[in-house]
Amino acid sequence: MRLFAVSFFMALLCSSCMAQDPYVVLKGESFTVELAETTEKQALGLMFREELQEDHGMLFLFPGQAMRSFWMKNTRIPLDIFYFDENLSLVSVSENARPCRTQRCPGYPSTAPAKYVLELNAGKALELGVQKGDTLSLHLD
């Protein structure tokens, strides 16, 4: 009985070790992402963050495809904003979106309808050499 209990505990422990945070892959590079699935999380985004780890980002999941526009109000770190369509194909990028602490912040619109939006540290688009049509791979389970 004791061997069964120890085996069960070890199996449970190992399965929790295997659980992984959601991540995406773009141009062969993986990024752990926070998911912005609700209106509240989407409105907050990465506001008030002092830093974003190099291999982390935020993925916005929308129920449908539409023109999207993001702004940087109360965002403290510069970001690259990647817009993907329903097929996870890159439709546009806003590079080096600057923090904004004023009441009138510029918008960073997509140039085509998007269903998914990925925010990464500024400079990632250039570093990865992204181009329209590049595909995003989602690993959200």
Image (cartoon, rainbow, N blue to C red):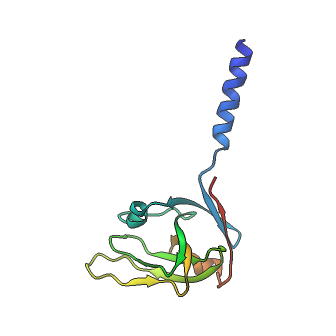
In the image, 31 versus 64, the foreground residue is 64
The structure residue drawn at horizontal position 37% and vertical position 70%, both measured from the top left corner, is 75
The quadrant in which residue 27 appears is: bottom right
Residue 87 visible in the picture: yes
Counting the numbered discs, the total is 0
The quadrant in which residue 85 appears is: bottom right
Please indicate whether residue 48 sits to the left or right of residue 28 in the image: left
Above or below for 2 versus 41: above
In the image, 100 versus 132, the foreground residue is 132
Please indicate whether residue 100 sits to the left or right of residue 18 in the image: left
Above or below for 14 versus 111: above
The quadrant in which residue 54 appears is: bottom right
The N terminus - image quarter: top right
Q: Residue furthest top?
A: 1
Q: Residue furthest bottom?
A: 111
Estimate the x, y position of residue 128 in percent, counting from the top left. Answer: 64, 77
Estimate the x, y position of residue 33 in percent, counting from the top left. Answer: 55, 60
Q: Residue furthest left?
A: 103
Residue 117 visible in the picture: no
In the image, 85 versus 93, the foreground residue is 85
The structure residue drawn at horizontal position 60% and vertical position 83%, both measured from the top left corner, is 91
Q: Residue furthest front?
A: 64
Estimate the x, y position of residue 52 in percent, counting from the top left. Answer: 47, 63
